[in-house]
Amino acid sequence: MTKQNRQLSHEQNEELLDILKNRFEKNMNRHDGIEWNSVQSKLEANDDKLWTLYEMERTEGEPDVLGYDNENNEYIFMDCAAESPKGRRSICYDRKALDSRKKNKPENCAIDMATEMGIELLTEEQYRELQNLGNFDLKTSSWVQTPDNIRKLGGAIFCDSRYDTVFTYHNGADSYYAARGFRGSLRV
């Protein structure tokens, strides 16, 4: 998608800000001490970040503010949908894995989708932090950033939550399942 296609209309901006504000207010436990007006001011000054949040929302990630980085003056958004975002499932891990499949290829891969959207896949640590704020991926799983040494051997890692425990697993990076997608983060 070209840069010019990454502009939201005034109506899309307003609708997105309303959605984000409502989610923010309904989930105050996720962002203690953060004021919505400050978040909104940052968002309104960053059209490219609004477009990225729109994409997160469009793919059913339900992004919300989960923190603030004082050092870099950035709000941290993450996908907070109860299950791995529906619009990002049935994908393998990265382009190399996608290209290696000879048949039954998925339509896309997590790394390419995240890059196109302007987000980062969650790390395993971020995924575990997210689980402290609620119950996520009780029926689905999410690819997370995979260490190079695992990826070089053809694998990739993903996480889910079962039995009140966060599990980290491995799979071939070229695998894909209807119940596996990915969660992302964005700094604004």
Image: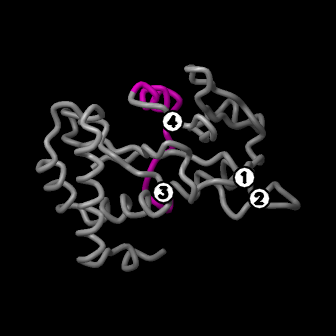
Give the amino acid type for the residue marked by disc 1 in the picture.
Answer: Lys
* Res 96 label: 1
Q: Earlier in the sequence, mark 1 or mark 4?
A: 1
- Foreground tag (2 vs 3): 3
Q: What residue sits 28% from the left and 68% below the top? A: 15
Q: Which residue is mark 2?
A: 99
Q: Are marks 4 and 2 in contact (CB under 8 Å)?
A: no
Q: Give residue 43's position: percent from left, percent from top.
A: 22, 57
Give the amino acid type for the residue marked by disc 2 in the picture.
Answer: Asp
Q: Which residue is mark 4?
A: 136
Q: Are marks 4 and 3 in contact (CB under 8 Å)?
A: no
Indicate the secondary structure of the residue bearing disc 3.
Answer: loop
* Res 60 label: 3
Neighbor class of circle 1 (other Cα within 10 Å; few <14, some 14-19, many 20+) is some
| Mark 1 → mark 3, Cα distance in angstroms | 26 Å
Q: Give residue 72's position: percent from left, percent from top.
A: 22, 39
Position of 56 compared to 83: left or right?
left
Indicate the secondary structure of the residue bearing disc 1.
Answer: helix
Give the amino acid type for the residue marked by disc 4 in the picture.
Answer: Phe
Q: What residue sits 74% from the left and 48% below the top? A: 177
Residue segment shown in magenta: 115-132
Position of 100 compared to 148: left or right?
right
Q: Are marks 1 and 2 in contact (CB under 8 Å)?
A: yes
Q: What residue sits 63% from the left and 26% below the top? A: 168
**Which secondary structure dominates the residues rendered in magenta?**
helix
| Mark 1 → mark 2, Cα distance in angstroms | 5 Å
Give the amino acid type for the residue marked by disc 3 in the picture.
Answer: Glu
Q: Give residue 87's position: percent from left, percent from top.
A: 56, 59
Q: What residue sits 60% from the left and 32% below the top? A: 160
